[in-house]
Image (tube, rainbow, N blue to C red):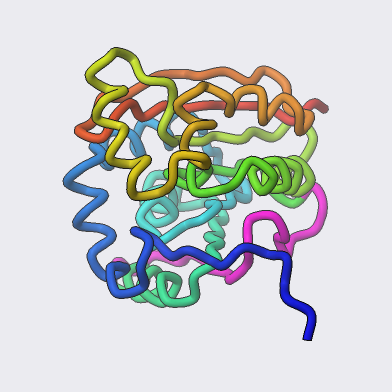
């Protein structure tokens, strides 16, 4: 039997047994509410727009987007069926209507030019450079001309302290994958995929390093 060339899927926090603790860990270590609310405001989501939350995890960002703009159509997608079950239950408990789909970031089950916004948080640093490139091209494909991409993830350290703190993330998630982020390569990544107006908008200092918010536009 031919072996698959795809890498083994790694769940949130690295192990499936840690998935139920994801919200608690992220909430207490990354200033989650601050940077995700900033990302939502940055995205300027309008009524009727179709929004994709890439690697939606337990659904926090997707739910907050729907609460911020109830007339938006929000879809979350993630490669981990277990975490999607948590997300669905959380949305149901919050009485929020969000569609959650199971798919990998570089093979999305959506048509071309389907979304007005794609948002993503704390995801790209998990990917190899090759899969970062594949994912960026997929996001370019599913966005409408003139639509926007908004990403929050670990970025180039603001100072020596932030760089030192980020070593913990690198030990947990791998030095090779995370080095792209701390080297500031996400801007080049999105530009290579065809995006324009790619910029780092703001940063947040956390106990694990510098969180950066990016934006990009698919040319009309």
Residue in the foreground of this view, choosing between 183 and 148: 183
Residue at figure coordinates x 35%, y 76% from the top left: 89
Q: Hey, which quadrant is residue 32 in on the image?
A: top left
Residue in the foreground of this view, choosing between 95 and 81: 81
Residue at figure coordinates x 66%, y 23% from the top left: 188
Please provide percent x and percent y for residue 144.
76, 41
Q: Can residue 98 be found in the magenta stretch?
A: yes
In this rendering, the answer to whether 196 lies above or below 91 is above
Please provide percent x and percent y for residue 157.
36, 20
Picture mark count: 0
In this rendering, the answer to whether 157 lies above or below 66 is above
Residue in the foreground of this view, choosing between 4 and 147: 4
Q: Can residue 182 be found in the magenta stretch?
A: no
Residue at figure coordinates x 68%, y 64% from the top left: 6
Q: Is residue 68 left or right of residue 201?
A: left
Image quarter of the N terminus: bottom right
Residue in the foreground of this view, choosing between 66 and 33: 33
Q: Hey, which quadrant is residue 160 in on the image?
A: top left
Image quarter of the C terminus: top right
Q: Which residues are magenta?
A: 94-113
Please provide percent x and percent y for residue 114.
74, 51
Residue at figure coordinates x 26%, y 49% from the top left: 26
Please provide percent x and percent y for residue 60.
35, 55
In this rendering, the answer to whether 184 lies above or below 171 is above
Q: Is residue 158 left or right of residue 148?
A: left
Toward the top, the furthest residue is 159
């Amino acid at each position: 039997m031919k072996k698959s060339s795809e890498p083994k899927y790694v769940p949130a926090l690295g192990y499936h047994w840690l998935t139920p603790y994801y919200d608690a860990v992220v909430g207490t270590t990354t200033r989650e509410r601050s940077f995700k609310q900033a990302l939502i405001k940055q995205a300027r989501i309008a009524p009727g727009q179709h929004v994709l939350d890439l690697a939606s995890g337990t659904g926090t960002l997707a739910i907050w987007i729907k609460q911020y703009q109830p007339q938006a159509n929000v879809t979350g997608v993630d490669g981990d069926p277990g975490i999607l079950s948590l997300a669905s239950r959380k949305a149901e408990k919050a009485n929020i209507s969000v569609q959650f789909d199971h798919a990998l970031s570089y093979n999305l089950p959506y048509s071309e030019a389907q979304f007005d916004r794609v948002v993503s948080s704390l995801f790209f640093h998990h990917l190899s450079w090759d899969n970062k490139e594949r994912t960026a091209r997929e996001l370019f494909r599913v966005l409408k001309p003139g639509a926007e991409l908004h990403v929050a993830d670990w970025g180039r350290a603001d100072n020596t302290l932030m760089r030192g703190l980020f070593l913990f993330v690198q030990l947990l998630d791998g030095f090779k994958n995370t080095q792209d982020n701390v080297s500031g390569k996400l801007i080049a990544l999105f530009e290579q995929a065809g995006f324009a107006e790619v910029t780092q908008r703001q940063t947040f200092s956390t106990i694990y390093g510098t969180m950066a918010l990016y934006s990009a536009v698919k040319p009309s």
